[in-house]
Amino acid sequence: MISFRNSLILKPGLILLILITFANPEVYSEDIDQLSELTVPISVYILDDQQGNYSSERSKEEIVDIFEKVNEIWSQAAIKINVRYIHRTELPHEIIKDFIQGNYKPFLNGINRKFDLQNHSIINAFYSKRIGGPNGRALTRYGFLLVTDTPFVHDQRVTSHEIGHLLGLGHEQYNKKRLMYSGTNGAKLTTEEIYTARKNAAEIFKNASQ
């Protein structure tokens, strides 16, 4: 996973906008509409159990539909999530059994040892029957996001929220209409969140192009 420590180089025309943002993070700017689109590549894996007991019930067509709606959400930041690969990945029974209970260590240790993770990207999404908790989870150290088959909120919202974490965004504590508030269908980003996400998306794109 890339480091998010690189500092943002401020353009003169954006200094006032960012000063306003820190004073009131709910402020939106018409300048957002002028931003060039950034592309973030992602690989998607639908997890299957070798024994069939804990396989995800999602289809590739469903994943395509989810990411079309994810891109509607992230369009407010002029960020496009480009799904470059969708694959059903079969895991050993004991590994996926631990995974659905929230123990990810055997899964992480087993990558390219006990099962193949083909065509991985800097950001990778895993859709599983269960993940040991509600909705989704971001393993930011690895650039992984996990989504359960049965979230309490919309699939595209779960995926978009976890992508937000992988783009450096933390949780929102107060406003349920915000994308980074947990457990709701809120989808709004503040100007500050947009610029943070774009800074990190640009770094991901640069690394993916090398």
Image (cartoon, helix red, strand yellow):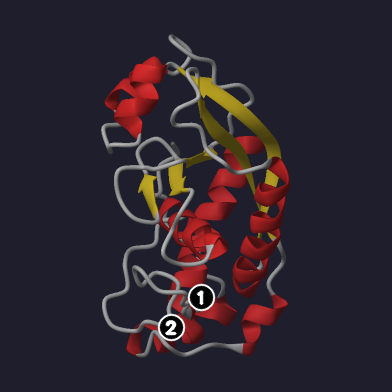
- Residue nearer the viewer, 177 or 47: 47
* Horizontal side, residue 135 vs residue 163: left or right: left
Query: Quadrant of the image for the C terminus?
Result: top right
The x and y percentages for residue 49 are: 48, 24
**Is residue 210 visible in the rendered structure shown here?**
no
Please say if 21 is above or below 125.
Answer: below
Circles 1 and 2 in contact, beta carbons < 8 Å = yes
The residue at which mark 2 appears reads as 177
Find numbered disc 2 in the image and state the secondary structure of the residue it sits on: loop
The x and y percentages for residue 195 are: 50, 69
How far is disc 1 from disc 2 in space, using C-alphas? 6 Å
Please say if 84 is above or below 179.
Answer: above
Q: Tag 1: residue type? A: Ala
Find numbered disc 1 in the image and state the secondary structure of the residue it sits on: loop
The x and y percentages for residue 24 are: 37, 90
The residue at which mark 1 appears reads as 187
* Horizontal side, residue 108 vs residue 202: left or right: left
